[in-house]
Amino acid sequence: MMPALNRILLAAVVVGTTGCQFFGSVDRDVVQKGSRGTAMEVNYVSRDQNAAMAAMAAKMPAILPPAGESPPGPLPWQNVQVLNDISVAEFNRTMVSMATWVAGGAGNCGYCHNLASFAADTYPDGKAIYTKAVARRMIQMTRNINSEWTEHVGNTGVTCYTCHVGKPLPNGLWFYTDENQILRHYLDGAGARVTSKTIAPSAANRSSVKQTEWTYALMISQSNSLGVNCTFCHNSRQFASWDQAPPQRVTAYAGIQMLRDLNTNYLAPLAPVYHPSRLGPKGDAPKAQCSTCHNGVYKPLYGFQMAKHYPAFWGTHTDWVTPFPPPYTTPPAPVPMDTVAVATDSAAAAGPPVRTP
Ligand code: HEC
Ligand code: HEC
Ligand code: HEC
Ligand code: HEC
């Protein structure tokens, strides 16, 4: 009785999964990328990419008209530490845009400011305005992405809207949980490569089943983040091969390196700045992943080039210009990582060079 039931269940699963692959589920759009017969087709999550693109465009705030003439004379600011290389008119245009992209409306200056003094980093009662401190660091991070990570973002770049899409908290935020958390791969630099080069087990590749599961979970999260299947980045007859993979895999590799930079150098160190309610169960700051920018699409905003209209986000990026004013003078303590045996990188020499930004 039980074995028979199992067989029926197994048959149902097999029919179910192969059915999806062979006939395409209702909401998939399948595009053939490689030669016929090589199974190099890409499944996009949305059947109608044009409709999805139109829905995204309808929500997107308009690009503000270019900034007009600025009054002559030196910059009037009292406490501008990053945006001191753009004109007064461009600065004001940038503030209005930031309010729209992050704080939900062009008039919501008070989300980051003491309205009695725009230069102040504190409220009238002396309490620090954490949103302003975070936003200042976010401007530096955005400049860093657009100037240092062109390998990934090309000349499309990003603005605050790419991640924030009109609200204070972007999508895809994550925190440390336990040692089985796959997104830690973005942060700790553990190799995702697990495929053996030999038939029999050998000392050259110590990857465990557990690490293989992490790699696959990471890959599934990347696929979901971009709304594509594995063949967007791999030739599925040889997942480890860079030669046979579409060029998107190299872009994705730069994306992983970029996220390590963003998470370790910009987002995690903000832990002491945030309001405690924003922190995770282990006290770490919220971090980003592929979906934070991509939002389920192979290129964020379908490749719409919003950033080129905003010179404020292309300037040179400067590291912590001035450390946070008191009470933020103590450098943030690193969050202890879980200790996990790390796989020897099975194909370290075969991949693109590891980038040190
Ligand atoms: C998302 C947060 C955020 C929002 C919303 C925001 N600002 Fe700002 N604002 C900042 C940051 C950060 C700085 C400091 C920039 C720097 O150090 O380069 C700043 C600086 C300023 C300054 C310079 C003050 C000085 O003399 O030092 C003015 C003026 C200003 N903002 C006006 C506005 C106005 C008007 C609005 C609403 C339309 C607005 N801001 C909305 C984050 C924000
Ligand atoms: C790569 C994605 C990314 C980009 C680009 C980005 N942010 Fe953020 N931002 C985040 C993440 C992640 C957080 C953490 C969310 C939280 O506070 O819980 C955050 C938080 C913030 C917060 C604090 C929100 C809160 O209430 O806790 C502000 C303010 C902010 N960002 C402003 C900006 C501004 C202004 C820009 C553009 C100059 C920008 N961000 C660009 C990812 C991004
Ligand atoms: C957006 C691009 C992208 C997608 C989609 C993607 N991968 Fe990957 N995959 C990569 C990159 C980049 C690496 C190399 C990571 C590294 O070396 O650190 C990789 C590595 C791997 C590896 C390890 C190869 C080795 O050398 O050991 C396997 C296995 C793998 N992917 C399987 C999958 C599967 C299965 C899927 C679909 C569920 C998938 N990938 C989807 C980009 C992608
Ligand atoms: C800071 C925002 C940001 C993050 C985070 C990010 N991406 Fe991207 N990604 C972009 C932008 C912008 C583009 C478009 C670049 C262009 O137009 O040339 C892009 C393009 C890509 C492409 C090329 C798509 C194509 O059609 O050629 C791949 C693949 C990709 N990203 C994978 C990833 C993966 C995997 C991750 C997570 C490891 C990731 N991205 C994280 C912003 C981001």
Image (cartoon, helix red, strand yellow):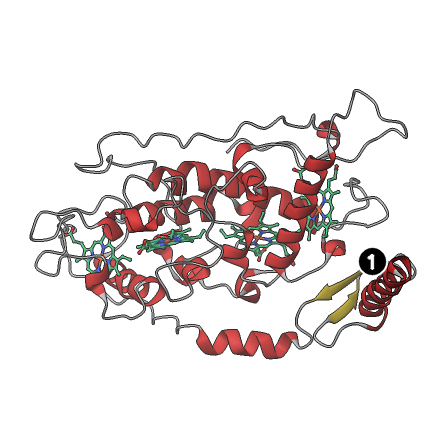
Residue 87 visible somewhere in the drawing? yes
Q: Quadrant of ligand 1?
A: bottom left
Q: Is residue 219 above or below residue 99?
A: above
| Residue 250 appears left or right of 64 | right
- Front one among 187 and 81: 187
Image position, residue 239 (x, y; %): 79, 44
Which quadrant holds residue 170?
bottom left
| Residue 259 appears left or right of 19 | left
Q: Which secondary structure, mark 1?
A: loop
Number of marks drawn: 1
Image position, residue 337 (x, y; %): 48, 31
Image position, residue 97 (x, y; %): 32, 65
- Front one among 211 and 289: 211
Q: Is residue 3 above or below residue 260?
A: below
| Residue 25 appears left or right of 149 | right
Residue type highlighted by circle 1: Met
Q: Name the residue under label 1.
A: 40
Image position, residue 269 (x, y; %): 36, 37
Q: Residue furthest top?
A: 203
Residue shown at 54%/27% (left/top)? 339
| Residue 297 appears left or right of 47 | left
Residue shown at 56%/63% (left/top)? 303
Residue 154 visible somewhere in the drawing? no
Residue shown at 39%/45% (left/top)? 280
